[in-house]
Image (cartoon, rainbow, N blue to C red):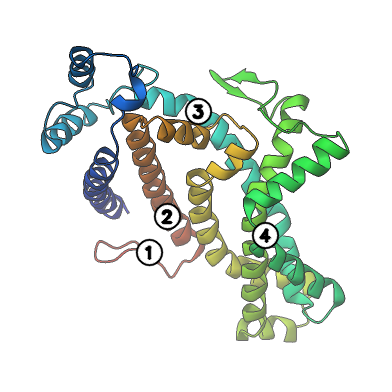
Amino acid sequence: MLTYILRRLAASAVLLLVMSLLVFVGVYAIGNPVDLLISPEADQKEIERVIAALGLDKPLWQQYLIFLERALSGDLGRSFAFHTPAIDLILSRMPATLELALAAMLIAIAAGIPLGLYAGLKPDSLIAKSIMAGSIFGFSLPTFWVGLMLIMLFSVHLGWLPSTGRGETVALFGVQWSIFTWDGLRHLAMPAFNLALFKLSLLIRLTRASTCEALLQDYVKFARAKGLRMRRVVGVHVLKNIMIPIVTVIGLEFGSVLAFSIVTETIFAWPGMGKLLIDSIQVLDRPVVVAYLLVIVIVFVFINLLVDLVYSALDPRVRLAPGHAAG
């Protein structure tokens, strides 16, 4: 196990190095932030001073080497717009995005797995067919349109929920959370559901397909032939085995929720990393964009490692031997 983890960490380090190069070159080769950050009335001397202060007067390869040297010590550069360390900006917004992502995944898991399980156990029932039809809508409807419709219905027409912001927060372990206040929950409800809708539909269809497949397996047929109650067959034999692909997908989808919550955060003005990324792109705040993308890569690497470990715990046939990886 330890050898496997060390091998994965070494591979992850190489991946981070390659991604840092691609991200840095891709971001720094586009546009000129000086045009947006400096007054149009500034003279040439002032422009050159700002370019030198931002480190943009050096060749691109030299800028990357400087960035890499500083990144090894945890410094991903200073924001051009806010004049603070980029990583501090990212980490200050991460709790809001993490809270939104966790709420969205909890909604998807709490509703998606039971609905998918029911649809798999009774595929010919009207309720099961309605569940599957609803999941198609969840796949098909654009996130931004659903968000706007939620605002129109629950904020504008009914006035039940606030349309923007994070609401009241409380500090826990030095981090501000809105999920522990009623006002915060009201602000969280719509963006969390909007972000969860696609994942909910995905889990419904995945759980249904896995359940239908599991019911055809010999171990399930044998359990039912022994006279075991259907509740026990589902709980012990079906659910345990279908959780292996479901846990894998949940882990990967949680990473994608963190990375791609940009649309939802923008629509509901949720003060998370996605909103920060959009604001930074608009002013070509390169250090913040690079820091955001690298943090997301690190999150995906960590989640993949965690999913492999959970996968091995759920499936005793999997062995994390030095010669091969789980899954």
Going by the image, does 141 lie left or right of 275? Answer: right
**Which mark is nearer the camera, 3 or 2?**
3
Instruction: Identify the residue position indicated by label 4 in the image.
Output: 141
Provide the residue designation for mark 3. Answer: 93
Name the front one of labels 1 and 4: 4
* Few, some or many residues within 10 Å of mark 2 (<14, 14–19, 20+): many
241 to the left or right of 317: right
Query: Marks 1 and 3, Cα distance to the nearest angstrom?
Result: 33 Å
Tag 3: residue type?
Arg
Looking at numbered disc 2 in the image, what kind of residue is underneath it? Answer: Leu
Which quadrant of the figure has residue 131? Answer: bottom right
Say which label, 1 or 2, has the lower sequence index.
2
Which dot, 1 or 3, sits closer to the camera?
Answer: 3
Query: Looking at the image, is mark 3 or mark 2 earlier in the sequence?
Result: 3
Residues at marks 1 and 2, CA–CA distance in whole angstroms: 8 Å
Q: Could you tell me which residue is drawn at 69 percent across and 31 percent down?
A: 164
What is the C-alpha distance between the residues marked 3 and 2? 28 Å
Which residue lies under the disc numbered 2?
Answer: 309
Residue placed under numbered mark 1 in the picture: 326
